[in-house]
């Protein structure tokens, strides 16, 4: 659900945003953006990269939503608004930076900023509405066969498996170095 929504909102929405910016800035055609994509040139590889990246990042976002879901407070409208605002601010801050090509070459400057902050906010807002509909008592999640209900969790863990292995190896290496340093200090 989160991946499919990411495909539509981030993948297709990001491509539409780039198309709008390219149309408004024909002089930027051929310039490589901060994300490594060529402005104004819509190749199959760039499109697939954007769609895949949007899908995978939003898949992680869906997992984060599942973890944070129980922390929501206030009335329904505030819950939806605050869940949508978080990714808009956090992801927007990661994407928008003053030294980037996207925010010097593309004019008006407020438009790429607004678009690249809005995309994660729209995604999180729609995810909240969709997830709460699926997860409500008596909803799809309760009625679905176990394998079908667990499949999205496997998709979420699957792309993260290499990262989890790397993090575990890093932690183990850190612990080993810490123990080695402690032993050396004890010997002295």
Image (cartoon, rainbow, N blue to C red):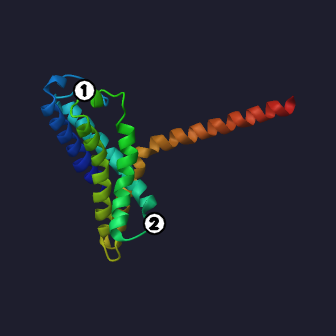
| Residue closest to the eye, 29 or 167 | 29
Residue 54, image x, y percentages: 29, 43
Q: Quadrant of residue 159?
A: top left
* Number of the label disc, if any, that sits on residue 70: 2
- Say above or below: 78 vs 45: below
Taking the spot 54% from the left edge, 41% from the top edge, the residue there is 167
On screen, residue 26 versus residue 116, left or right, reads left
| Residue closest to the eye, 69 or 160 | 69
The Cα–Cα distance between marks 1 and 2, rounded to whole angstroms, is 42 Å
Name the residue carrying label 1: 105
For the question of whether residue 135 can be seen, the reply is no
Residue 123, image x, y percentages: 29, 53
Identify the mark nearer the N-term, 1 or 2: 2
Residue 59, image x, y percentages: 35, 50
Residue 166, image x, y percentages: 52, 38
> Are discs 1 and 2 less than 8 Å apart at CB?
no
- Say above or below: 56 vs 140: above
Taking the spot 36% from the left edge, 54% from the top edge, the residue there is 85
- Name the secondary structure under disc 1: helix
Q: Quadrant of residue 27?
A: top left
| Residue closest to the eye, 56 or 77 | 77
Crowding at dot 1, Cα within 10 Å, few <14 / some 14-19 / many 20+, comes out as: some
Q: Residue furthest bottom?
A: 138
For the question of whether residue 98 can be seen, the reply is yes
Crowding at dot 2, Cα within 10 Å, few <14 / some 14-19 / many 20+, comes out as: few
């Amino acid at each position: 659900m989160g991946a499919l929504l990411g495909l539509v909102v981030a993948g297709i929405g990001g491509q539409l945003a780039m198309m709008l910016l390219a149309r408004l800035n024909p002089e930027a055609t051929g310039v490589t953006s901060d994300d490594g994509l060529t402005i104004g040139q819509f190749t199959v590889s760039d499109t697939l990269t954007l769609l895949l990246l949007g899908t995978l990042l939003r898949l992680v976002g869906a997992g984060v939503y599942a973890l944070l879901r129980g922390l929501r407070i206030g009335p329904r409208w505030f819950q939806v608004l605050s869940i949508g605002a978080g990714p808009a601010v956090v992801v927007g801050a990661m994407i928008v930076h003053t030294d980037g090509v996207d925010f010097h070459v593309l004019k008006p400057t407020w438009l790429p900023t607004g678009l690249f902050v809005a995309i994660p906010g729209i995604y999180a807002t729609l995810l909240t509405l969709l997830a709460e509909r699926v997860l409500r008592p008596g909803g799809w999640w309760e009625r679905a066969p176990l394998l079908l209900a667990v499949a999205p969790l496997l998709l979420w863990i699957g792309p993260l498996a290499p990262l989890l292995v790397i993090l575990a190896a890093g932690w183990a290496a850190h612990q080993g170095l810490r123990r080695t340093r402690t032993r050396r200090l004890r010997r002295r």
